[in-house]
Image: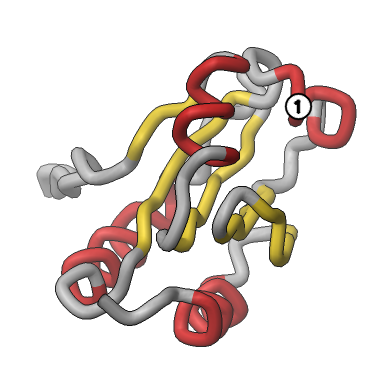
Amino acid sequence: MAKKNIDVSFIKVIDSHESWESNVLQNMGVLLIIDVYSTCWGPCKMLDNHFSNTFYEMAEDHALTFCRADCEKVPELSKEFQGNAMPNFLFYLDGNRKELVTGPNMPAILELIAQLAPKK
């Protein structure tokens, strides 16, 4: 059976201090859901289908953006997350960290999106 290709073109890649500054710390009025990963483990692709469905269902009415950040390329994340095999999902709003979900806990992620994502 052929593997289904999932559209993840809506996910922004954060791969430097500069992209962290411009996409996260200076981004106002939008909830950012950031998949933080180590280079050796890669991003949490098992949730891509859930993220795709959530984005396309909610993005019309809610201000939200999904991102992926390699903690080894983003100094602001390296100390806390480097070498961590467990997926970590940061929630940022108006440049401030709001929540952290450790592990692929989609119910917790969806609950936080519903609570934190500003309406358009």
Residue placed under numbered mark 1 in the picture? 76
Q: Is residue 37 above or below residue 100?
A: above
The quarter of the image holding the C terminus is: bottom left
The local crowd at label 1, few if under 14, some if 14 to 19, many if 20 or more residues have their Cα within 10 Å, is some
Q: Is residue 68 above or below residue 120?
A: above
Name the residue at the right extreme.
79
Is 25 left, or right, of 99 in this rendering?
Answer: left
| Displayed quadrant of residue 108 | bottom right
| Displayed quadrant of residue 8 | top left
Q: Amino acid at mark 1?
A: Glu
Viewer-proximal residue among 117 and 1 = 117
Look at the numbered disc 1 and give the secondary structure of its residue: helix
Q: Position of residue 23 (x, y in %)?
A: 46, 35
| Number of on-image labels | 1
Examine the rendering and report whether any part of residue 101 can be seen: no
Q: Position of residue 107 (x, y in %)?
A: 54, 82
Q: Residue at x 62, y 39 (%)?
A: 36
Q: Is residue 22 above or below residue 105?
A: above
Q: Is residue 76 above or below residue 8?
A: above
Q: Residue at x 68, y 25 (%)?
A: 71
Q: Residue at x 33, y 81 (%)?
A: 119
